[in-house]
Image (cartoon, rainbow, N blue to C red):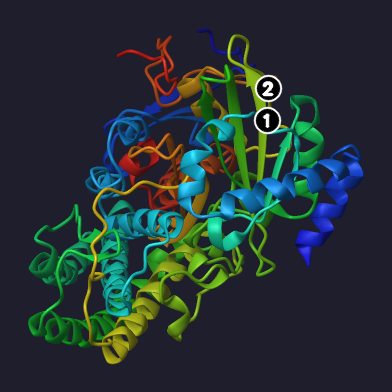
Amino acid sequence: MIIETVTSQLLELFPEYAQATEHVVEIVALEEQPSPEAKKGKKEQLVTRQNGLKNCSYDACGYHLDLQLSTGQLLAATALLFKNGFFLETITGVDWIKEKQLEAVYDFSRYDFDLCRVVVRTRVPRENPAIPTITGIYSGASWHERETHDFFGIKFQGHPHLIPLLLPEDADFHPLLKDFKA
Amino acid sequence: MTEPIVLQPDETFVLNVGPQHPATHGVLRVKMTMDGEYIYNAETVIGYIHRMHEKMAENRTYSQYLPNLSRLDYLSAMAYSHGYVLAVEKAAAIEVPERAEYIRAITVELNRISSHLVWFGAFVLDLGGFSPLMYAFDDREQILDLLEGITGSRLTYCYFRFGGIYNDIDEDFIQGTRQFIKRMRKALKMYRKLVTTNIILIKRLKGIAPVSVDMCQRYGATGPVARGSGINYDVRKNEPYSVYSDFDFDVPVFTECDAYARYNVRMEEMEQSLRIIEQGLDKLPDGPVNPEKKPKAIKLPPGDYYSTVEAGRGSFGIRIVSDGDKNPYRLKLRTPTFSNMHLFDEACRGMLIADALAFMGSLDLVIPEMDR
């Protein structure tokens, strides 16, 4: 099964995450509880998640592995997924304004029937959001990264052509930031 | 905002295709650097009809956002609403009556055929054959009439609701659909004789515009583009959703990787969709089409949800990030044409311009879906 293969390879790559996995399993159990608990624990949800690999329930959230890592480890993880035959589904961002962080989210999936969806996340400070580009591994990341740059202002370092894609060519605003005023 | 300087051979010139050009089927612009008739380099410029649907989602409740989904891809709008309602239902754990799911599958497949028919007509028109468009639009008109009868709209359907559908189908729709299946089977035979085996079409498409498996993986191509490159990937089979596991249908895969393979995938897909519709009508269970207790104000438990469906052009994904509020905290639309079109720049290098236009047609572009 590809899930086990990828999990073990990822853990080999980042040995410090082995412990994090155990730690995070508790969080999953918490999330699976019905909503009244979630309402009460709304403040706790704001606690920034630690980097680590999380096994998720595919039926509940739609993906199997959820990996959060530092920007420095992004390229290694992406290269590993590419080597294992994953294709890039999409890249997007989320603005966590209360935590003063921007998150870039990468979705990977597979063409064969050995189903495994992997989400890779990385968080950067809002004041200076810079993430290395993965266009060297996945050429198709180019447009996705340009779009994410349009919407969130995340700078993808090393991107060959980081100009506005969907927004006008002279756009200097980032509409999906939560403090954006039209 | 300066563009990187690309060194070019001496004898090239820049040809601007679009934003308004018959072959782009929408406002899409391609800056082509030409060496005579051959493309030396191409840069696709998109975003002319960008409407920021993702920001709109943050300002609306989950129900208010429903009509937006059919404005993404105006040719196969049903599949996009289907993806959205499934994503929300999964996250909010809303039960859907079986009859509603069957009707959803039937209407989505009807819509897929109508979408492929537009592609078929327009594609052959791009290649210089005018009359197939007339036949294709005549057949498509039957579908639009059927869907108009039950949904009330002809293109931008807002038929699905969380937990069910807007209203039940009637006997007219069932009879009409059965008649349409008969008619469409005849028409597909005719298309095969008239167009598919036509020597001019074959000469224009066979061996043209190869897209390798490696390229599909690097760009994340899905749908008929991937299946024309020998990749057996169809979300309906790989991650069965709704009631698709109840149906017996095949996923057409062609390994030639050329424009003709992509053409054949879509032609075969129409036949397979007819099979699904036929089985859906045969198996259609009785019962309600909406849950007894209709969900009113929908709030998703905090979390991050991802859901995918097979739309007319490939895998359509939705990511919903919820903070427990009545509006989504963040909603991302992963549209198939966006990834499929991206590989054009790389794949068309060294191609004749006439072949590049055939290539563009074989990708089946719907621009509003790409620009969102």
Q: Nearer the viewer, residue A38 or B10?
A: A38
Q: Name the residue: 19% across, 67% down.
A: B140
Question: What x and y, as percent, mark residue A92?
Answer: 53, 34
Seen as rendered, the residue at the extreme bottom is B282
Q: Position of residue B125 (x, y in %)?
A: 27, 55
**Disc 1 chain ID:** A
Residue corresponding to mark 1: A122
Residue at label 2? A131
Q: Is residue A178 above or below residue B59?
A: above
Q: Of the residues shown, which amino acid type is indicated by label 2?
A: Ile
Q: Measured along the vertical axis of the image, is residue B72 above or below residue B199?
A: above
Q: Residue at x 60, y 28 (%)?
A: A103
Residue A129 versus residue B235 in the image, above or below: above
Measured from the top left, where is residue A71 in percent x and y? 74, 26
User: Quadrant of residue B313 in the image?
Assistant: bottom left
Q: Is residue A71 left or right of residue A166?
A: right
